[in-house]
Amino acid sequence: MRKFISVLFLVFLAIATTPQASAHVEIVNSYPEQYSNVNPIPTEVWIEFSGNLQTLEGQAVNSVEVIDSTGIAVNYEDAVISGGRITTKISGQSAPGAFTVKYRVVGDDGHVIEGDYTFNASPDYAAGQSPMPVSSAKEESSIPAGGILLGALLIIFFGGIYMRAKKRST
């Protein structure tokens, strides 16, 4: 009995702790960085991803939009794609305060990645001023929920088989 439960527990641990592969591109760097305070207001914004972005001739499959503190989109011209980096220009007439950067990109694997982040920009920020969060970050659990569920189902399944076999033998 102990040996059987030990094996089930080890199978559960192996499944629950196996890292899940993610082929999707993700942000590795950006300017300005999330939650940063920048001085002066930037003239361009760029986001660099972990893999190349798809480009289809004549079609805009990747986009980035920058919205200032008044809610107005302040980027102009089409976004420029270079490998894994998307860049856009920002108007010099942007209002200082919290800026939101919204992006939608397609990685080489064909998966669409959408998201946004914020930063603060003003001519009044001192060079050493510490960043101030302007929105909440989404945190993801490092525990694979699917692995835990599968492990629990396996324990129930094999436990049921064991209990039936034990009941039949008595």
Image (cartoon, grey):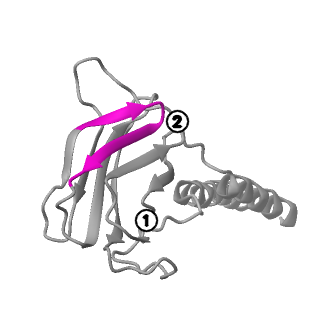
In the image, residue 134 lies at what x, y percent? Answer: 34, 77
Viewer-side residue, 54 vs 97: 97
Residue 63 is situated, as x and y percent measured from the top left of the image, at 27, 41
Residue 31 rendering spot, x and y as whole percentages:
44, 55
Question: Looking at the picture, which amino acid does disc 2 mark?
Answer: Gly
Residue bounds of the magenta highlight: 78-91
Q: What residue do we see at 40% from left, 78% from top?
A: 133
- Disc 2 secondary structure class: loop
Q: In the rendered structure, which amino acid carries the disc numbered 1?
A: Gln
The magenta stretch spans residue 61:
no
Residue found at x 33% / y 54%: 115
Q: Residues within 10 Å of mark 1 (few under 14, many from 20)?
A: many
Which residue is label 1 attached to?
A: 34
Contact flag, marks 1 and 2 (Cβ < 8 Å): no
Of 94 and 84, the residue lying toward us: 94
Residue 144, placed above or below residue 64: below
- The chief SS type of the magenta part is strand
Where is mark 2, residue-wise? 51
- Location of residue 87 (image quadrant): top left
Tell which circle, 1 or 2, labels the residue nearer the N-terminal end. Answer: 1
Relative vertical location of residue 68 with respect to residue 61 in this rendering, above or below: below
Secondary element type, mark 1: loop
Q: Residue at x 21, y 65 (%)?
A: 68
